Image (cartoon, rainbow, N blue to C red):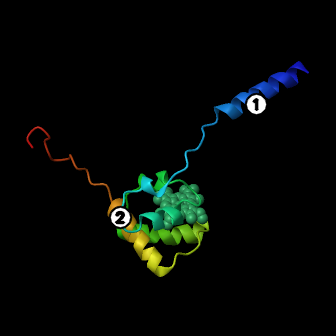
């Protein structure tokens, strides 16, 4: 009996310690044409974090759409939506350039 009580206390503690997921909104993405479309097409399976930490060329984002459909089960996007979303992603999440490399911040 005591064991059962301790067990349920532990489980209760674990449940309480779970972080409450903060619902995301389109505004986590930078404003621009395609912001909402990208948000709603891309957050069915994962948060935007995996997108926001990525940096790809337009061709890579385009290829990722195929990968998402073929390997992850995403519903294929309408061509016009796909163009808009890929444009949006490429514009805001392009390959990372190292902005400070080669520039001395003290000389600017
Ligand atoms: C049907 C579910 C689903 C949808 C919808 C979806 N994804 Fe994904 N995505 C996944 C899964 C699952 C993974 C993780 C695959 C793995 O690495 O295990 C993933 C991984 C990713 C990654 C990481 C790729 C890497 O490994 O570098 C990016 C970036 C990404 N998704 C972008 C998007 C974008 C942009 C959209 C909207 C166009 C989107 N996803 C829509 C399922 C989905």
Residue 46 position, x and y percent, is 56, 55
Q: Residue at x 91, y 21 (%)?
A: 1
Q: In the rendered structure, which disc, 2 or 1, sits on the residue that comes first in sequence?
A: 1
- Which residue is at the front of the view, 96 or 7? 7
What residue lies at 41% left-to-right and 76% top-to-bottom? 83
Q: Residues within 10 Å of mark 2 (few under 14, many from 20)?
A: few
Figure quadrant of residue 21? top right
Residue drawn 39% across and 64% down? 89
Viewer-side label of 2, 1: 2
Task: Report if residue 61 is visible in the image.
Answer: yes
Q: From this view, report whether residue 63 is shown above or below residue 94.
A: below
* Disc 2 from disc 1: Cα separation: 45 Å
Please provide percent x and percent y for residue 105. Answer: 14, 40
- Indicate the secondary structure of the residue bearing disc 2: loop
Query: In this rendering, would 7 be left or right of 78?
Result: right
Residue lying at the far right of the rendered structure: 1
Q: Secondary structure at mark 1?
A: helix
Residue 24 percent across, percent down from the top left: 52, 51
User: On residue 32, which mark appears?
Assistant: 2
In the image: residue 12, left or right of residue 99: right
Q: Say if residue 94 shows up in the picture.
A: no
Residue lying furthest bottom: 79
Image: 11 above or below 1: below
Q: Residue 11 got which mark?
A: 1
Residue at point 52%, 64% (across, down): 40
Location of residue 8 in the rendering, given as x and y in whole percent from the top left corner: 81, 28
Q: Is residue 78 above or below residue 52?
A: below
Quadrant of res 12: top right
């Amino acid at each position: 009996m005591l064991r059962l009580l301790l067990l349920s206390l532990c489980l209760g503690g674990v449940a309480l310690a779970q972080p409450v997921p903060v619902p995301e909104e389109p505004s986590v993405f930078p404003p621009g044409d395609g912001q909402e479309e990208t948000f709603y097409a891309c957050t069915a399976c994962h948060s935007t974090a995996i997108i926001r930490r990525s940096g790809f060329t337009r061709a890579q984002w385009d290829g990722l759409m195929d990968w998402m459909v073929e390997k992850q089960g995403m519903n294929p996007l309408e061509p016009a939506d796909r163009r808009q979303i890929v444009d949006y992603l490429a514009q805001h999440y392009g390959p990372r350039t190292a902005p400070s490399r080669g520039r001395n911040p003290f000389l600017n």
